[in-house]
Amino acid sequence: MGQLTCLYNARVYTMDAGRPTVSALALRDGRVVAAGSDAEVKNACGGGADVQDMGGAVILPGLTDAHIHLEQYALGLQKVDCETQTKAKCLERVAARARTTPPGGWVLGHGWNQNSWPEGFGTAQELDAAAPDHPVYLTAKSLHAAWANTAALRLAGLDDGTPDPPDGRLGRDQNGQLNGILFESAMELVDAVTPEPTPAQTAEALRSAQPALWAMGLTGAHDFDRRRCFEALQMLRLSGELRLRVLKSLPLEALPHAAELGLSGGFGDDWIRIGGVKVFMDGALGPQTAAMLQPFEGSGGERGLLFMDGEELFEHGRTAAEHGLPLAVHAIGDRANHEALRAVAQLREFEATLPSTLGGGRRLRHRIEHVQLLHPDDARRLAELGVIASMQPIHATSDMEMADRYWGGRARYAYASKLQLDHGVVLAFGSDAPVESPNPFWGIHAAVTRQRPDGSPGPQGWMPEQRLSLGQALAAYTLGPAYAAGWEDRLGRLAPGFLADLIALEHDPFELPPDELHLIKPLATMVGGEWVFRR
């Protein structure tokens, strides 16, 4: 057995209902072995322990981002930052990167949002002027649209006569000519010709990104990137350099291969575990590709894109359920959420018919990613069906103006985490990084205040009836993700037998004014009983 470590003189919020606050923890072999008063834990540690005075710091369980794209976030740190207040500033940054890139090399960027720019969408010609000697490809903040220049379109073999692909759309001007904007699956046409990193390069990017995540207080992540990211994570796991607990989703196209191999949900260890099968029902709010029951406000009848209906989702879910794989369903619009819930209702009936050897009688932990807009008739359906609400509270404050503009009065049922919690739904909070920052304290601030850091839209926040308490928000970054991952017996709380993943804070978040929660920066982060970050 390894050496005991004793952390004392702290205020520990354990998230354990049996003993919610203690002042000391004893740790051994990466797990908590005792939690109690200073005297109790020092007595348990005995002589020879590594005794560490925490100086009155506040300790919380390590936080988990329940929806992140690890590879895209890590690689995005190397891209042009296009999250600017004006289109002109974005174009300036593209031009600056082009000046330091050899002619013919790709200029890649991320983060633009046409709804934040007075001029709206950019054009291929504007990118041509900013980078005349380079192909340029910039993904939108939502990751559901992209902006490409003429050189990039040409390399992808696209011209004015190219038809829209299934589940996607090529942006065109009033004359029917390509304008450089790509929606949904149309992005894949240019993605296919951009330079792809190798798994080793992705592993290096992830290795470099880990300290940034630790510094924010993150010790775990539910990843929704694809095979290359899975390979890179396994490389880090084998080399002993993976210091995040990762629940790894499988893309839908991998389901037949997983089924053939007999791969089941929950397979893995305490570092990487197989999660659910990621399925897309629709697009996003910003580009108006979310699938709607009624048209977007002022859109001339646009109802977005529904990629599959409930029957098709059920068929995929049935195959997944036979292998113990839950679904993780991307659903933004009220129609997409309605169809997803219709499929899960059928799945619950199917699961009950499975033999015990295939988990019969066991409810798989299906989850809906985003749950951004529900029809009022569907508000209780997640609770009735036992579906986890995997939500991103920072989306509410980021998107509130778009939601009001495009959804009007329907926004009352948008980003409604308190409504779901009141119905008894398990919340698992994340960021969807790189769509938003993965900083969990920004998400906690948004959940508690329904405000942006600048205080907008006002003292009560946007849709203030959806505000959570701090305790509820913290649970959605600890207990909720642990439950969603099937790790509730080892993660999410600081109690004997649980993994020693924790963060130390200088200030007690329960004593801070709510509008200061986004300013919290951990002093230190521990994963598996080892300090991986100290400020």
Image (cartoon, grey):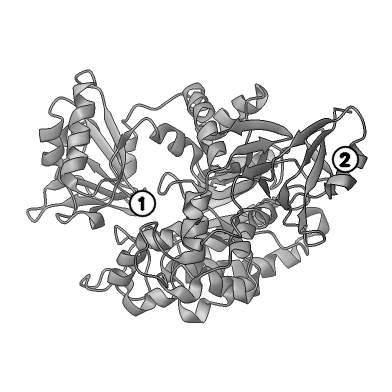
Nearer-the-camera pick, 527 or 99: 527
Q: Position of residue 327 (x, y in %)?
A: 59, 56
Pair 2/1: label in front: 2
Quarter of the image for residue 79 reads top left
SS state under label 2 = helix
**Mark 2 and 1 residues: CB-CB less than 8 Å, in contact?**
no
Where does label 2 land, which residue? 42
Relative horizontal placement of residue 130, taking residue 424 as reference (left or right): left
Which residue is at the far front? 55
Q: Looking at the picture, which amino acid does disc 1 mark? A: Ser
Compared to residue 233, the image places residue 418 above or below, namely below
The C terminus sits in image quarter: top right
Q: Position of residue 217 (x, y in %)?
A: 58, 43
Relative horizontal placement of residue 267, taking residue 25 as reference (left or right): left
Relative horizontal placement of residue 468, taking residue 130 as reference (left or right): right
Where does label 1 land, which residue? 142
Question: How many marks overall?
Answer: 2
Nearer-the-camera pick, 53 or 141: 53
Q: Residue at x 15, y 36 (%)?
A: 150
Quarter of the image for residue 230 reads top right
Nearer-the-camera pick, 368 or 509: 509
Q: Position of residue 469 (x, y in %)?
A: 58, 67
Residue 330 in sight? no
Q: Looking at the picture, which amino acid does disc 2 mark? A: Lys
SS state under label 1 = loop
Which residue is at the far top? 102
